[in-house]
Amino acid sequence: VLVHISTAYSKVDEVVIDETVHPVEADWRKTIQIVEALDDDILEVLKPKYIGMMPNQYIFSKRLAEQVIVDYSRSLPCVICRPSVGTVL
């Protein structure tokens, strides 16, 4: 079983954090290709348009990562945990 630790903040724009994964408008595979192909200055200019209505790129990346897990869950048992507070050990 793959356990992915996300964050409750991935749902910061929702009043109730339910146990669903909402799709992101961007495809994670294409996002990787774009990030690898463009330099940081261009990415910084494109970022507001690319992440859309997300409050910031952190939340965008968390939702994108959850979509990766959903895609792989078809062939691998997966769990997404969304703690509200995290610490580094």
Image (cartoon, helix red, strand yellow):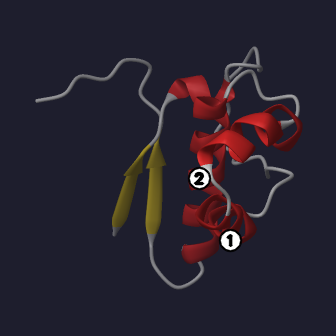
Residue 45 appears at what percent x and percent y? 79, 36
Q: Quadrant of the C terminus?
A: top left
Residue 38 appears at what percent x and percent y? 68, 59
User: How many numbered circles does the render carry?
Assistant: 2
Which residue is nearer to you in this view: 36 or 26?
36
Which of disc 2 and disc 1 is earlier in sequence?
1
Q: Quadrant of residue 59?
A: top right
Q: Is residue 41 left or right of residue 49?
A: left
Residue 66: numbered disc: 2
Q: Quadrant of the N terminus?
A: bottom left
Residue annotated with mark 1: 29
Q: Residue at x 59, y 65 (%)?
A: 36
Residue 14 appears at what percent x and percent y? 77, 20
Compared with 63, 37 (above or below) is: below
Which element is circle 2 on?
Answer: helix
Q: Residue at x 68, y 19 (%)?
A: 12
Q: Is residue 24 left or right of residue 18?
A: right
Residue 54 appears at what percent x and percent y? 78, 29
Rounded to the nearest angstrom, the CA distance separating label 1 from label 2 is 13 Å
Which residue is nearer to you in this view: 89 or 83?
89
Which element is circle 1 on?
Answer: helix
Instruction: Identify residue type, mark 2.
Output: Glu
Instruction: Identify residue type, mark 1.
Output: Arg
Which residue is nearer to you in this view: 61 or 20?
61
Residue 67: numbered disc: none
Q: Quadrant of residue 78?
A: bottom left
Crowding around mark 2 (Cα neighbors within 10 Å: few <14, some 14 to 19, many 20+) is: many
Q: Residue at x 68, y 25 (%)?
A: 56
